Amino acid sequence: MKELDDFFHSAVHYCGIIEDCESNQIHSKLKTLLVSLLELYSKAIFLPEVEPGNYEGTDLNIVVPEINFGQYDHYWEVFNPYHLEEPVGASLSDDILDIYKDIKKGILLYEKNEQLEAIWEWKFGFEIHWGSHAVDAIRALHSANLK
């Protein structure tokens, strides 16, 4: 399935950027990270709806890399654009690493030949968790790239 292969390659690319980036290099990779995240988000929209088999949420021991965005880490966010609320503080590194954990889990399942479970993890996580983090991170990265 082309949509799945496209998403898988985007997911591997995104996680590779995070894994291969030393904290002191992150400022030079903001644009690369933004492009990768936009690609990942746009491809997640087309993931099919599936039901996992006998999936029990296996613990996959994901090692989360450390990442530091320095002056770009903290930003202001409004959770619901349709309600007037005060902005709250947010963390770009928290967004990026939450996305990483959710995406990496699906990659590990996919590589264990558990494709239905991987698709379900990616799609479900996109709809309830990492998709929101991606939207917030995209806005923050967009602003950081303009500086």
Image (spheres, rainbow, N blue to C red):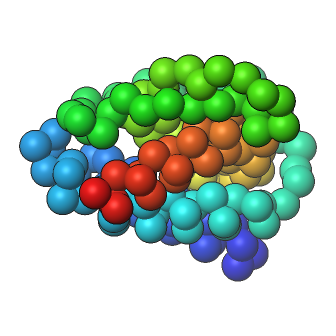
Return the x and y of residue 56 as percentages of the image width and height: 74, 24
92 or 46: nearer the eye? 92
Return the x and y of residue 115 as percentages of the image width and height: 69, 53
Vertical placement of 111 versus 73: above or below? below
Position of the N terminus by quadrant: bottom right
Residue at the location (70% across, 78% down)? 2
Return the x and y of residue 51 as percentages of the image width and height: 89, 43
Residue 97 seen in render: no
The image quadrant that residue 102 belongs to is: top right
- Whether residue 79 sits left or right of residue 103 in the image: it is right
Residue at the location (43% across, 32% down)? 75
Position of the C terminus by quadrant: bottom left
The image quadrant that residue 82 belongs to is: top right
Residue 147 seen in render: yes
- Whether residue 125 sits left or right of residue 25 in the image: it is right
Residue at the location (61% across, 65% down)? 7
Residue extending farthest to the bottom is 2
Vertical placement of 8 versus 64: above or below? below
Residue at the location (62% across, 71% down)? 5
Vertical placement of 55 versus 6: above or below? above
Residue extending farthest to the left is 24
114 or 81: nearer the eye? 81
